[in-house]
Amino acid sequence: MAKPTLYNSTTHQLIRSRVESLSPDSQQKWGKMNLPQMMAHLRKAVETGLRKGPAKFSIISFLLGPYIKKMVMSDTPYKEGLPTAKKMIITDERDFDIEKTKLLAILDKFLNAKDEFPSPINHPMFGKLTEEEWGYSQWKHFDHHLKQFSA
């Protein structure tokens, strides 16, 4: 059975509907980021794959990247409260409506950019990702955080 991918229009629409269902009253089940911060975090993760050019790698990426990539690409859902890469943590206050609008826009751009960006895409932690890996990893990340806020 094929893994879900945000490059699939049906799967994309299901995730989009879950994002649309979020409201300022959505209940947080775990984590430190509030809902607008989480939406900014998801947007930032998608933007990583929409950049053209080489990704910047660190020694941590070299050492831990293959292990983390294996976990990300597995069928096992992420555990609640997993640590977040420091560059991906959002700590400043954000506006709910603005972040939701930006997240929906980048989600649509991701689907529409499928044919614009070369595969494999360089990820700063995992190295080269195929189209399937990129679409699945983004779906899994969205699914995890939408469950965090009961969507």
Image (spheres, rainbow, N blue to C red):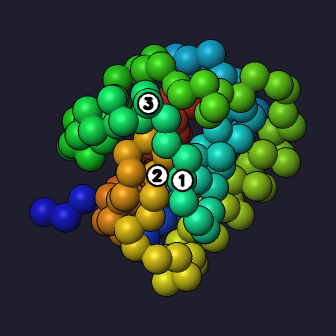
**In this view, the mark in front (2 or 3):** 3
Q: Residue 15's x, y, as percent? A: 50, 56
The residue that appears at 54% across and 53% down in the rendered structure is 55
The residue that appears at 71% across and 29% down in the rendered structure is 90
Q: Is 86 above or below relative to 103? A: above
Q: Quadrant of residue 79?
A: top left
**36 left or right, relative to 15:** right
Residue under label 1: 55
Q: Residues within 10 Å of mark 2 (few under 14, many from 20)?
A: some
How far, Cα to Cα, is label 2 from label 1? 6 Å
**In this view, the mark in front (1 or 3):** 3
Callout 1, which amino acid? Ala
Q: Quadrant of residue 136?
A: bottom left
The residue that appears at 85% across and 26% down in the rendered structure is 93
Q: Quadrant of the N terminus?
A: bottom left
Dot placed on the residue nearer the N-terminal end, 2 or 3: 3
